[in-house]
């Protein structure tokens, strides 16, 4: 049995001393972590190992179309056509081991930081962040490689391996989905006792905070359909800071790490290897009202008949959690708990910052007439427009009906059927090779 973390190097520390550039981190050597600074550096290493994969997820949705003439298409075309069982060897694998490397580092911090560096508010913060990072890794793994959450079957549905101890010889097998969530909630509860910083300064906002913890909880409860809790956590996150970029007078894209909307700016959502091989799909572009929805020109650039993304693709647009998502979770949760007035109010608060004044008047009149399924449909459509290419769409499709999607590539038509088993990713071949328990 091969090790879960074959070849993982616990003792590689990353210096976080320079914040002149966003996430300006450089390897400085290998030492045994002993001091508070050592453990902060180790945590920075854990953050830096968190993988880039949201662009790959977008390929599986209705957000992108492939540029079949791109030299980089070979790395993505089998993801785009859902050819999971016999993908070209050049196809970029979805991540697995890198998640557990982050988990491994976080666990060392959780286990050893207080014992070696002593008890202090700074050590508490570091350990609290480590708990949240470990929870977030398990959460993302679960939503990649397990079926969509179903309360009735979660106790028996196959989830992912849970790693909370430093034991490279242990044989890790997938735990049931509900058991994985139990560990996620346990880590969050421990983090809540420790974490003491509300917001880090710009340049360090890749780190978890109390505000981020509430945003994370809101997303978890949304995915689980626990709407009262989702509403409460979204409101708590927004109580710290509820600012939105007003696209009528701001040139700052809301996904920019400098934005007041930024809660955690950790993930690159459309890396160059993907972005060079795709265009934004006409279907996505059609969802924006030309002339009134400012996102059409703020989020995208037009080249001939094609569109490219302006909100993703470089370090300045790293995004994991931001305020607009909290508004949308609040609106969705308010609707699901029967508070349609709050759902409308929250939805319109976001639209007010995204539409021209005249466009907002039209939107306001439209939303005022919506109720029942039509209102929910508009909330979800706003999620599609606002959170496009940030990694949410695949998860939303899984949550709501797993609809059929059709892609065209090189003259062929490919279809992901409704409720297709491919809405749940297979574990990567390299992970199965290292751990046959994943088979």
Image (cartoon, rainbow, N blue to C red):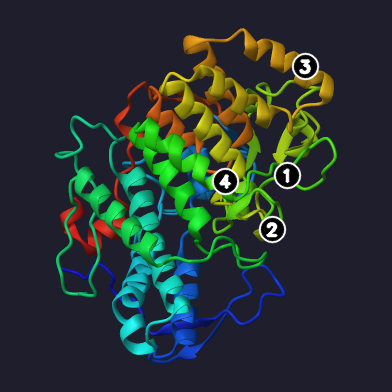
Q: Residue at x 34, y 82 (%)?
A: 114
Q: Is the residue 154 above or below the residue 206 in the image?
A: above
Residue 61 is situated, as x and y percent measured from the top left of the image, at 50, 33
Quarter-wise, where is residue 232 in the image?
A: top left
- Judging from the image, what secondary structure is the residue with disc 2 in? helix
Q: Nearer the viewer, residue 185 or 398?
A: 185
Q: Name the residue at the top extreme.
A: 369
> Mark 2 or mark 1, which has the lower sequence index?
1
The numbered mark, 2 or 3, whose residue comes first in the sequence reads 2
What distance separates the C-alpha of mark 1 from that of mark 3?
27 Å
Residue 115 drawn above or below residue 322: below
| Mark pair 3, 4: CA separation | 27 Å
Closer to viewer: mark 2 or mark 3 = 3
Whether residue 91 appears in this view of the structure is no
Q: In x, y percent, where is residue 369?
A: 62, 7
**Label 2 sits on residue:** 316
Q: Secondary structure at mark 3?
A: helix
Verify CB contact (< 8 Å) between mark 1 and mark 3: no
> Residue 310 has which mark?
1
Query: Which residue does the numbered mark 3 point to in the structure image?
Result: 361
Q: Residues within 10 Å of mark 4 (few under 14, many from 20)?
A: few
Mark 2 to mark 3 CA distance (whole Å): 33 Å
Q: Which residue is mark 4?
A: 239
Q: Residue at x 46, y 85 (%)?
A: 36
Q: How many neighbours does mark 3 have within 10 angstroms: few (below 14), some (14-19), or many (20 or more)?
A: few
Numbered circle sitting on residue 198: none
247 or 435, nearer to the observer: 247
Tell me the SS state at disc 1: loop
Q: Between residues 83 and 345, which one lies in front from this camera angle?
A: 345
| Whole-number angstrom distance, CA of label 2 to CA of label 1 | 11 Å
């Amino acid at each position: 049995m091969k090790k879960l973390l074959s070849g993982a190097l616990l003792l590689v520390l990353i210096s976080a001393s320079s914040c002149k550039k966003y996430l300006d981190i450089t390897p400085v050597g290998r030492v045994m972590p002993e001091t508070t600074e050592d453990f902060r550096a180790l945590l920075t290493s854990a953050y830096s190992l968190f993988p880039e994969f949201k662009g790959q997820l977008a390929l599986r949705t209705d957000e992108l179309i492939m540029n079949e003439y791109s030299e980089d298409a070979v790395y993505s075309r089998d993801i785009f056509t859902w050819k999971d069982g016999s993908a070209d060897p050049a196809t970029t694998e979805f991540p697995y081991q890198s998640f557990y490397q982050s988990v491994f580092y976080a666990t060392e911090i959780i286990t050893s930081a207080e014992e070696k560096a002593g008890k202090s508010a700074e050590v508490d913060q570091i350990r609290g962040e480590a708990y949240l990072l470990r929870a977030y890794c398990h959460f993302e793994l679960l939503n990649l490689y397990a079926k969509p959450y179903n309360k009735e079957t979660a106790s028996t549905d196959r989830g992912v391996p849970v790693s909370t101890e430093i034991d490279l010889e242990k044989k890790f097998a997938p735990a049931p989905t509900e058991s994985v969530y139990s560990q996620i909630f346990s880590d969050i509860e421990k983090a809540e006792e420790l974490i003491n910083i509300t917001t880090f300064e710009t340049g360090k906002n890749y780190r978890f905070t109390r505000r981020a913890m509430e945003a994370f909880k809101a997303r978890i409860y949304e995915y689980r359909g626990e709407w009262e809790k989702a509403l409460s956590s979204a409101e708590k996150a927004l109580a710290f800071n509820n600012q939105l970029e007003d696209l009528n007078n701001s040139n700052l894209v809301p996904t920019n790490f400098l934005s007041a909307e930024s809660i955690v700016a950790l993930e690159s959502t459309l890396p160059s290897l993907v972005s060079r091989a795709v265009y934004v799909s006409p279907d996505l572009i059609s969802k924006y009202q030309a002339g009134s929805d400012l996102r059409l020109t703020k989020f995208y650039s037009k080249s001939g008949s094609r569109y490219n993304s302006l909100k993703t693709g470089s370090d300045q647009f790293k995004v994991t959690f931001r305020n607009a998502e909290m508004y949308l979770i609040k609106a969705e949760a308010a609707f699901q708990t029967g508070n349609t007035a709050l759902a409308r109010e929250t939805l319109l608060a976001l639209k007010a910052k995204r539409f021209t004044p005249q466009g907002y008047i039209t939107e306001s009149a439209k939303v005022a007439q919506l109720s029942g399924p039509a209102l929910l449909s508009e909330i979800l459509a706003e999620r599609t427009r606002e959170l496009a290419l940030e990694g949410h769409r695949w998860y939303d499709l899984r949550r709501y009906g797993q609809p059929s999607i059709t892609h065209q590539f090189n003259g062929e038509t490919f279809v992901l059927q409704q409720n297709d088993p491919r809405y749940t990713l297979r574990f990567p071949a390299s992970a199965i090779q290292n751990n046959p328990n994943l088979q």
